[in-house]
Image (cartoon, rainbow, N blue to C red):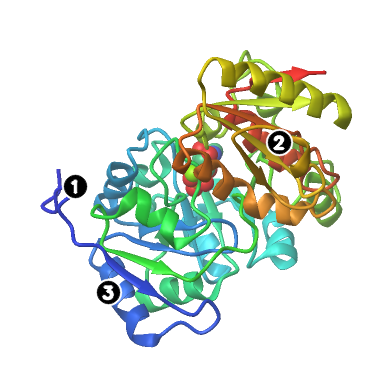
């Protein structure tokens, strides 16, 4: 255990402008990172919990603060493309093409690990995950600290990823040196992860950047890890983090799929039963359907046609279920055209794959 025992740190909380963060606050944050301490910061996807990626002690502190299993590797955040070549080995040509197309942005690439990256950061793997975030606060923190920053999502392990500074505070206050609050994030779900270490590039975690977008840039087929779309758990996902039940609210969440009218009828039938059993019920609905339910609380995730809005609101809504003390939660399904795969991957995991078809 480090000298700053968990729960004994005074966490500094600084609200900063997302586009033009205060130089003094950024310097304080950068000094913490240089010093091996942890700072949570906004990115365009979700908030990250950062520490010096090349310092094994800083990585250990990240696992401890999150309560994260130590076999679940961290993503190394960089601000210059050249740093990919510093932390990675035998980096394939596709990496440059993808970086030119999508960096800074919500894409993480897995390449072979160079020895400068400690095993504490890669969860013991000989590969490393690297991303250049598209957020001024994140980029300035990397540049000002002079460090590469290992950063998983800034939530307690198992809880929904944070999309606002206050979510980070709920989970990590007293456990880390500083929280930089740059307001709500833009995308709201974690980066797409592509594995470039195999013959055929493979998406290990779906996100805003789809397999079709990746495939178009590198001119070859990009497959999706069969382990993450399997309805059962007979195939293990390749990204260690994808095997955990995750993003989950405390109440029992069930997804209901089918044509909309049947979904509404089924959810109303189930919430009525739950109410008789004395349970607090919540329905996750859309602007179009929010007035059609009789649950205790109805949370609208946005308009069904605006999938970016749905992605951005997802984790905040799952957290709200906890705040409201929901016991039985029902959600409509959001298999939207572009981000549907990423949204449904998170929702299915939050629901522990509990789905009813109607
Ligand atoms: P988070 O930063 O919390 O969004 O989690 C990072 C995700 O990236 C987890 O699902 C990890 O398992 C995955 N990951 C990180 N490094 C690797 C790697 N070298 N190989 C496969 N997956 C990785
Ligand atoms: Mg995470």
Q: Nearer the viewer, mark 1 or mark 3?
A: 1
* SS at circle 1: loop
> Do the residues under discs 3 and 2 have CB atoms within 8 angstroms?
no
Specify the quadrant of the image occupied by residue 290.
Answer: top right
Residue 344 at what x, y percent from top left?
A: 71, 36
Looking at the image, residue 47 sits to the left or right of residue 254; the answer is left
Q: What is the quadrant of the C terminus in the image?
A: top right
Residue 275 at what x, y percent from top left?
A: 58, 21
Residue 271 at what x, y percent from top left?
A: 65, 23
Tell me, yes or no, if residue 346 can be seen here: yes
Crowd class of label 3 (few under 14; some 14 to 19; many from 20; radius 10 Å): some
Specify the quadrant of the image occupied by residue 185.
Answer: bottom right
- Which residue is denoted by mark 2 in the rendering? 344
Residue 249 at what x, y percent from top left?
A: 50, 34
Q: Residue, x 68% and y 19% (percent of image)?
A: 270
Mark pair 1, 3: CA separation: 20 Å
Q: Give residue 315's mark.
A: none
* SS at circle 3: helix
Specify the quadrant of the image occupied by residue 263.
Answer: top right
- Which residue is denoted by mark 1 in the rendering? 6
The answer to whether residue 234 is above or below residue 83 is: above
- Which residue is denoted by mark 3 in the rendering? 31
Looking at the image, residue 155 sits to the left or right of residue 288; the answer is left
* SS at circle 2: helix
Specify which label sits upstream in the sequence, 3 or 2.
3
Q: Nearer the viewer, mark 3 or mark 2?
A: 2
Q: What is the quadrant of the N terminus in the image?
A: top left
């Amino acid at each position: 255990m480090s000298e700053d025992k968990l729960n004994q740190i005074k966490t500094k909380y600084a609200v900063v402008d997302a586009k033009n963060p205060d130089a003094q606050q950024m310097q304080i944050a950068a000094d913490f990172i240089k010093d091996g301490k942890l700072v949570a910061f906004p990115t365009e996807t979700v908030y990250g919990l950062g520490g010096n990626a090349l310092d094994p002690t800083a990585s250990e502190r990240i696992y401890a603060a999150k309560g994260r299993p130590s076999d679940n590797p961290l993503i190394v955040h960089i601000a210059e493309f050249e740093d990919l070549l510093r932390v990675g080995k035998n980096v394939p040509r596709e990496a440059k093409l993808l970086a030119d197309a999508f960096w800074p942005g919500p894409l993480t690439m897995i390449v072979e690990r160079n020895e400068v990256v400690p095993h504490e950061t890669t969860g013991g793997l000989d590969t490393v995950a690297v991303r250049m975030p598209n957020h001024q606060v994140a980029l300035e923190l990397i540049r000002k600290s002079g460090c590469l920053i290992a950063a998983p999502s800034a939530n307690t392990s198992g809880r929904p990823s944070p999309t606002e500074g206050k979510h980070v505070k709920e989970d990590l206050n007293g456990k880390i040196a500083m929280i930089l609050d740059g307001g709500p994030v833009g995308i709201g779900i974690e980066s797409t992860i592509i594995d470039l270490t195999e013959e055929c590039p493979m998406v290990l975690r779906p996100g805003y950047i789809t397999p079709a977008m990746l495939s178009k840039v590198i001119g070859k087929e990009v497959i999706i890890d069969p382990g993450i779309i399997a309805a059962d758990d007979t195939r293990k996902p390749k990204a260690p983090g994808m095997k955990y039940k995750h993003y989950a609210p405390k109440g029992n969440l069930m997804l209901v799929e089918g044509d909309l009218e049947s979904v509404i009828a089924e959810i109303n039938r189930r919430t009525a039963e739950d109410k008789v059993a004395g349970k607090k019920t919540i329905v996750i609905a859309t602007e179009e359907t929010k007035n059609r339910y009789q649950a205790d609380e109805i949370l609208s995730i946005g308009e069904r046609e605006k999938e970016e809005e749905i992605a951005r609101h997802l984790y905040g809504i799952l957290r709200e279920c906890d705040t409201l003390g929901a016991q039985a939660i029902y959600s409509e399904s959001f298999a939207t055209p572009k981000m549907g795969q990423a949204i449904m991957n998170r929702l299915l995991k939050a629901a522990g794959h509990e789905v009813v078809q109607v």
